[in-house]
Amino acid sequence: MKQPSEIIHNGKSLEAILTDHKIWLDGKGGECASLKGANLVDAYLVGAILYMANLEGANLEGANLKDAYLAGANLEYANLERASLECANLDMANLKGVNLKGVNLKGVNLKWVNLEGEVK
């Protein structure tokens, strides 16, 4: 598994992106996490707070998102093949066209999730 400090997206470590996102959520500056098209294959994101984050088209194949908070996140056309979403909160997330092949959805909150379009 790759740690957030080992993953770079648009010249910035995922760890820094997640920190800025938390600051943004706390209303103290920072910025909303934009991980559009990010390569997050095998990322270790257990318990990650990605509320309202943009993960459109991100490759999360094999990522560990156990207990992650993805409520309101945009995962449109993301690749979640073989990812673990066990006990994750996806309340009101956009999962339009996502690849869910082999995904662990045990205990996932899927309330008001958008599954419009072709989900693979």
Image (cartoon, rainbow, N blue to C red):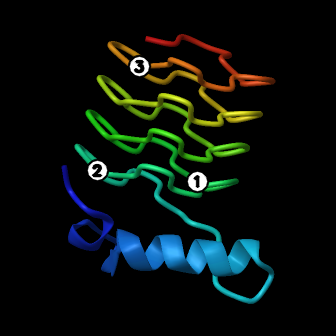
The residue lying furthest to the bottom in this view is: 29
Instruction: Tell me the CA gap for discs 1 and 3.
Output: 21 Å
State which quadrant residue 79 falls in.
Answer: top left
State which quadrant residue 113 falls in.
Answer: top right
State which quadrant residue 8 falls in.
Answer: bottom left
In the rendered structure, find residue 54 and report the number of the disc placed on it: 1
Decide: marks 2, 3 in contact (CB < 8 A)?
no
Residue drawn at point x = 56 percent, y = 80 percent: 20
- Indicate the amino acid at tag 2: Ala
Instruction: Tell me the CA gap for discs 2 and 3.
Output: 15 Å
**Callout 2 secondary element:** loop
Q: Nearer the viewer, residue 57 or 24?
A: 24
Q: Residues within 10 Å of mark 3 (few under 14, many from 20)?
A: some
| Residue assigned mark 2 | 43
Instruction: Tell me the CA gap for discs 2 and 1.
Output: 16 Å
N-term-proximal mark, 2 vs 3: 2
- Indicate the amino acid at tag 3: Asn
Residue drawn at point x = 63 percent, y = 73 percent: 22
| Residue assigned mark 3 | 104
Q: Is 92 left or right of 101, judged from the image as shown?
A: right
Residue drawn at point x = 76 percent, y = 77 percent: 26
Q: Nearer the viewer, mark 1 or mark 3?
A: 3
N-term-proximal mark, 2 vs 1: 2
**Callout 3 secondary element:** loop
Q: Position of residue 39 (x, y in %)?
A: 28, 51
Q: Position of residue 9 (x, y in %)?
A: 33, 68
N-term-proximal mark, 1 vs 3: 1
Query: In this orientation, does residue 79 appear?
Result: yes
Q: Is 36 left or right of 115, judged from the image as shown?
A: left
Decide: is 120 above or below 45: above
